[in-house]
Image (cartoon, helix red, strand yellow):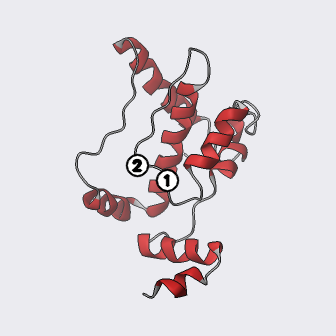
Amino acid sequence: MDSSILDSLDRKTKLSLLAKIIDYDEIPVTIEQFISDDYYLGLATDNGRGIYKVWRQAFNEMYPDPITLSSTFICLNGSTRTGKSNTSKIMIAYDIYKLLKLGKEKALKYFELMPRPFVIGIGHKTKQQAEANVAEIYELLEQSPFF
């Protein structure tokens, strides 16, 4: 396709085309709606108010739209009690949501196309901390009517 044709399209049309290429039946909601809407994580995040402002801004930078990610590698760092673990849980929940929006067969096809290795890392000082973080991801998902 000629790039000048793509350049002439507005952002919403480009997203719709990308969604069709990936095979979404509908475009997933934005990260902002995902963390604020009661149907997704709004109940768990006080409609997004429970998330530090800096992380809400970071979410919008990491997820510039509902389909793409600004980087293939994201490392959250900072001092203790600054929201890194909560941020990672929300990111994992959003990625699970987007995969579920594809449906089981399409999601499996998507994973087959991904380059190897594919890793989601949860790093903590102890095994117990990592296990607790994974348990918290399940708890977060259980608070959402979508999941």
Q: Which residue is drawn at 30% across and 56% down?
A: 111
Q: Quadrant of the N terminus?
A: bottom left
Q: Which of 103 and 123 is in front in this view?
A: 123
Q: Which mark is residue 69?
A: 1
Q: Mark 2 and mark 1 in contact (Cβ < 8 Å)?
A: yes
Q: In which quarter of the image is residue 108?
A: bottom left
Q: Position of residue 26 (x, y in %)?
A: 56, 69
The disc labelled 1 sits on which kind of residue?
Leu
**Distance from the alpha carbon under mark 1 to that under mark 2:** 7 Å
At horizontal 54% and vertical 21% (from top left) the residue drawn is 78
Question: Label 2: how many residues lie within 10 Å, few (<14), some (14-19) or many (20+)?
Answer: few
Q: Residue type at mark 2: give it.
A: Thr
> In the rendered image, which residue does mark 2 sit on?
72
Q: List the single residue furthest toward the left.
A: 116
Describe the element under mark 1 as helix, strand or loop. Answer: loop
Task: Please tell me which residue is depicted at 48% across the width and 69% down the height of the picture.
Answer: 24
